[in-house]
Image (spheres, rainbow, N blue to C red):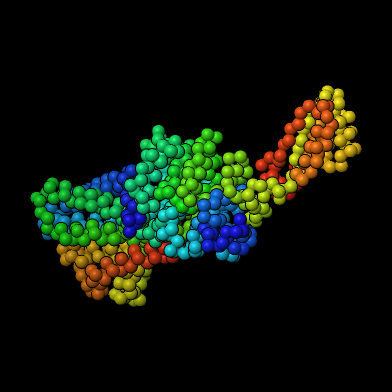
Amino acid sequence: MGEFNTTNDVISLQAVSKRYGNETVVRDVNFSVQAGECVVLVGHNGAGKTTLMKLMLGLTRPSAGTVEVLGGNPTRSAAVAQHKTLGYLPESVAFYDAMTGSEVLSFYARLKGVPGIDCENLLQLVGLSDASKRRVGTYSKGMRQRLGLAQAMLGDPQLLFLDEPTTGLDPSLRQHFYELIDALHKEGATSVISSHALNEVEARANRFIIMKAGAIVASGTLDELYQQAALPVRLRISVTPGEASSVADRLGSEVTIGKVNLDDVNNQSLNLSCFNGEKMPLIRRITDLGDVVRDMQIMPPRLDEVYNHFMNGDPS
Amino acid sequence: MKMLWSLALKELRDGLRNRWIAAAIIVLGTLALALSLLGSAPTGSVRASGLDIIVISLASLSVYLIPLIALMLSFDALVGEFERGTMMLLLTYPITRWQVIMGKFLGHVMILFIAILAGYGGAILIMIMLTDGSTEGWQAYALMMASSLVLGAVFIALGYLVSVLVKERATAAGTAIGLWLIFVVLYDLLLFGALLVDENQVIGQQLFSMLMLVNPTDTYRILNLSLYEGVSHAAGIAGIANEAGLSGTLLLSVMLLWVIAPLTVTLLVFQRREL
């Protein structure tokens, strides 16, 4: 995305580090987020995602480096006015337990300067209409999370920070949640989302930043991450019963690319793997074998394998 | 300003919801009524002025009660929000840190205002109705109510200071009780002891007035017991404030300083605080 010029940056971090005492929780982080992008920070718990969010929100100051959000240091006093256009969902969000769901939401709406907003509609959108008159103290974790989403969406924010937004949400709500985010993106919103795993739903994002122990270990679009990880493609072929070992022999001796593993359950299927660039020649070899090959499945590396590759440093 | 007001209203609603205001009204009202009924008995027919007498006993009671109520309201205000994590979210809204402090302060002062107005005001109205309907000495009573609010504000501010400095709610609660003991009980005990031992040798009038100004609860006491002649005569401390050169304005200014100083330090600490 180098063709974008820097004036488009909504967020820019340069050589940012953060230490608490002797512990370095963020080390030498550089990245920028352009207007309209949806960037996902991925990493285990303790990888520094939450601290990065707090740095971008101006809740805490970097020990080294510079953080710029919406054209300035987020800890400066003028940044407070920009909070009108900002939505934040903290990790394991907490509310004032004695208030009801709709009281909480209208309190935040007044603070955000949008007191006239239709809170009931927003509560319905996150599936909390039935519980809106109940004390937040009685809410389950998932319900708190949904209330957290509702408050983050108050006043059509232009910049969203969502810290592990889908934990505690059931799959259908997860889907629904990303639809809400998509709708905001269509109106030009920018978002930074953190996640502890790369799962299929989060794959809707434009770009991923994978973090480990406070540092960025990889970043890019999904395709770029696949390329960087260079994980092998797996092929599984079914052959005429009893022919598997002979096919394996023929492929193994004639084909110098990839790896051949015999799946010897009933001598009729084989697992092969090769790197992405070697895939087509291998497929040609297989089709050259003729009628003995009955079926072929091509399995690209899964998202979690890519993630594990970067997290563990070993190709699975 | 709107944000500040929203926050103040939230605190006020919290006070109504958790029956804080109701409890404070009942405590202040009942004790005020009991003391004024008891207080009027010995004076009987020779009473110079009804309400003046009540001020003496009520001011002595307020010195203990108002700081306690104020500290209970305020010790949790910041550390509680840090601990639960609600402060983090609050600060991502378009609200500055000084607005957070001032909004809470305004809300808590309103709670105390309602409690004092309804508790002490209600008690005195009942008292007037029960007796001959004389309202003589109402100025002293009004001053007592107003200065009680200022005394409350002092301890709300001190409670915030505790709340912003400590790491845990439990520590804040303990420290608040400690503050109460020091300001309300220990200081006077030590001062009294020192005066007894000293026998007027080192602690002269000047130093004594200074020592009264150092502790806001003593400032409150002096203000209420010596400003109105009727009260000070009955209290047996006629004119000590005048002799010491302590005018009502000075006493009240000192108390206001005790509000502003802890609030300012609280704000400075809060501004530097990382969440």
Q: Is residue A226 left or right of residue A106?
A: right
Q: How many marks?
A: 0
Q: Residue A301 is drawn in which quadrant?
A: top right
The image shows residue A189 at horizontal and vertical percentages of: 48, 51
Give the vertical position of B214 relative to A126 (above or below): below
Q: Residue B190 is drawn in which quadrant?
A: bottom left
Q: Nearer the viewer, residue B7 or A32?
A: A32
Query: Residue at 85% of width from left, 28% of height from top?
Result: A244
Query: Residue at 32% of width from left, 72% of height from top?
Result: B210
Q: Is the C terminus of chain A in the top left, top right, bottom left or bottom right quadrant?
A: top right
Q: Residue A276 is drawn in which quadrant?
A: top right
The image shows residue B242 at horizontal and vertical percentages of: 22, 72
Q: Nearer the viewer, residue B198 or A191?
A: A191
Q: Nearer the viewer, residue A72 or B9?
A: A72
Q: Is residue B54 left or right of residue B152?
A: left
Q: Is the N terminus of chain A in the top left, top right, bottom left or bottom right quadrant?
A: bottom right
The image shows residue B6 at horizontal and vertical percentages of: 34, 52
Q: Is residue B33 visible?
A: yes
Query: Residue at 26% of width from left, 51% of height from top?
Result: B114
